[in-house]
Amino acid sequence: MSADVTLPAGRSLAANRSWRNELMTASLATQVLLILAAIVTVIPVVWTVLSSLKSNDTIFAIPMQWVPDALHWNNYSEAFEVAPFGRYFLNSAIVAASVTATTIFFGAMAGYGFSKFRFPGRDVVFGLILVTFMIPFPVIMIPLFVLVRNFGWVNTYWGLIIPGALTGFAVFMMRQFIQAIPGELFDAARIDGAGEMRIFLTMVLPLARPALATLGILTFLESWNNLLWPLIVIQSDEMETIPLGLTKFSTLYSSNYAQMLAMAVIASLPVLVVFIVGRRQIINSLMLSGIKG
């Protein structure tokens, strides 16, 4: 391991060597800890994937058998035959994509308004939005269900999508990021005759792409894994989402661990793909979040 290290001035050669050795030791210890943390995180995932290809008799065999003697790919196909997981995936995809798209668009629009415009009561409204962070979902769960029922959205896509179409976190995150963009850029566009909607679509959204990607990934993960709200608002098998379907499957077929693990693996694939595609944007967002213009 080699690194370019700038030695502090005014020290003896022995002191500089000692300081460099301490720095390398600390770096090595950090890398070892990160490797151990990665191993601890990956081991359950590897066990789940391998166990989804085992028979029920060998999943909890003692001693543990990591690699099965025969790969039971039929666990995946049989699980789809027992429960309508295809429908569950479609419902989750529609809800997660819709919630993510609306949250990104309206969150960016609200963040642009709160960061670059002055209007009466702006700080008060933004403060109320911050207060929503302190309110746990179970507190508003019943009033929200009553409101959805009054609109006739129970057991519909509207009931699953509209309550999560915009969150206070999205407004706060986009406001903080857009606030770091120099306002002179927007003033120059206005002088050239650009309207606010054109500025928002052609300037704000492209410049805020790292934050939008991060917000989109976080929103998609939360919506895809959401169990409590679909459990409340959904009343038919045709509208159930993946988390609700997995919970129902584990209740009815609690002894069929192989198929349960197979469906858990498939349910994790969209989340993994979304993270792999957007991981670079997340890193860029973290790097740019501290830059002020």
Image: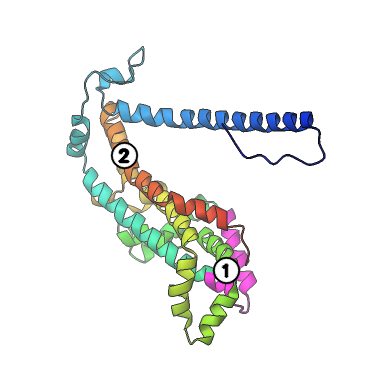
Q: Quadrant of residue 123?
A: bottom right
Question: Mark 1 sits on what residue?
Answer: 181
Query: Mainly helix, strand or loop, the magenta region?
Result: helix
- x, y percentage for residue 95? 33, 56
How has the structure been colored for display?
rainbow
Whether residue 98 is visible here, answered yes or no, is yes
Please identify the quadrant where the C terminus is shown. bottom right
- x, y percentage for residue 148? 39, 62
Q: Residue 246: which numbered mark, if any?
A: 2
Residue 120 is left or right of residue 140, and the answer is right
Cα gap from disc 1 to disc 2, whole angstroms: 43 Å
Q: Residue 171: which numbered mark, if any?
A: none
Can you tell which of label 1 and label 2 is closer to the viewer?
1
Residue placed most toward the observer, 226 or 286? 286
Q: Amino acid at mark 1?
A: Ile
Q: Residue at x 52, y 84 (%)?
A: 190
Report the magenta residues as a range: 112-134
Q: Quadrant of residue 292?
A: bottom right
Residue placed most toward the observer, 186 or 3? 3
Q: Amino acid at mark 2?
A: Leu
- x, y percentage for residue 22? 70, 30
Please identify the quadrant where the N terminus is shown. top right
Q: Relative to 146, is 15 above or below?
A: above
Residue 141 is left or right of residue 31, and the answer is left
* In the image, residue 116 lies in the stretch drawn in magenta: yes
